[in-house]
Image: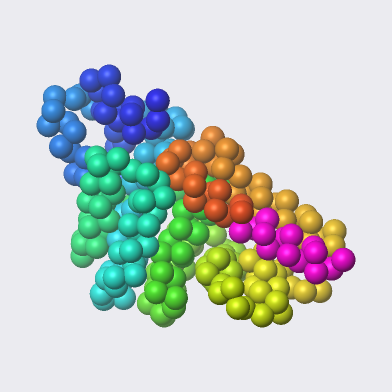
Amino acid sequence: MSWWGKIIGGGFGFMLGGPLGALMGMAAGHQFDKGLHAVDLEPGNTERVQLAFFTATFSVMGYLAKVDGKVSRSEIQMAENIMAQMNLNASQRSTAIDLFNQGKQDDFPLDDILLQFKQECHRRTNLLQMFLEILIATAYADNKLDKTEHEALQYISRNIGFSAAQFERLINMVSAQQQYSQRPATASPKATLSQAYAVLGVDREISDSSLKKTYRRLMSQHHPDKLVAKGLPEEMIKLANEKTAEIKSAYDLIKNSRK
């Protein structure tokens, strides 16, 4: 049974404590109006981490959408696209939308949410990175990143344990991945190759051996099965698959250009 099934299955609702639990409680409270009894999951439990990831992702996504003073249609569309990719059922979709809307509120407790989320992930760095990559992609939904959004993402990044250098590298990689995946069929081979290097976060002078090491590291970081085992909601596996497909495509392009 998936993490969502365990939230509402068997007559019990498995919930989190803390600020993440409060958000999910408000978003999915209607489930408990049906007579279900809430039971806390043990810290470190995979379903608990998946629940924390889902709650933090959609609520902080809402916060980011509002941080520049307005919520653009493209940002809403990005959130809807992620929901569509996850194939959420009606109940899950309703909960995700509610979390997104809670994140847009002026009193959204960002610091508390990030602190608990980091604690729930407990050194699962690849999971934290995936969370950050989703948020960066959301901010880039309108194909630009303004100063307010950049500062907000930097703040989020720092609070979940990433250095300034790591954050800037992720910003550049996610931006390149967005451009690479949306490249027109008429794009010049030179421009496409340049984007491929950026997708991997390397420059043209990198050696073949270092290129291969970088490729393997990125594939490992985004491996769907590994991420799900660490706490990525199973419904988000398509996002991880798309990441690995982009990374492989970029690597193959570079490798073939060097023959």
Q: Position of residue 15 (x, y in %)?
A: 29, 33
The residue most toward the front is 186
The residue most toward the top is 10
Q: Position of residue 103 (x, y in %)?
A: 27, 58
Is 165 situated above or below 239?
below
Q: Is residue 225 left or right of residue 28?
A: right
Question: Is residue 157 or residue 211 the one in the foreground?
Answer: 211
Q: Is residue 259 left or right of residue 118?
A: right
Q: Position of residue 134 (x, y in %)?
A: 46, 58
**What residue is at 14 percent from the left and 24 percent from the top?**
35
Is 122 situated above or below 76?
above
Is 148 situated above or below 231?
below
Q: Is residue 70 left or right of residue 64?
A: left
Q: Position of residue 130 (x, y in %)?
A: 51, 53
Q: How is the image coloured?
A: rainbow
Secondary structure mostly seen in magenta is: helix
Q: Does any portion of residue 125 appear in the rendered image? A: no
**What residue is at 56 percent from the left and 74 percent from the top?**
184
Q: Quadrant of the C terminus?
A: bottom right
Q: Which residues are magenta?
A: 246-259
Question: Is residue 109 or residue 172 the one in the foreground?
Answer: 172
Q: Write down the quadrant of residue 146 in the picture.
A: bottom left
Q: Write down the quadrant of residue 168 in the picture.
A: bottom right
**What residue is at 23 percent from the left and 20 percent from the top?**
11
Q: Quadrant of the N terminus?
A: top left
The residue most toward the right is 259
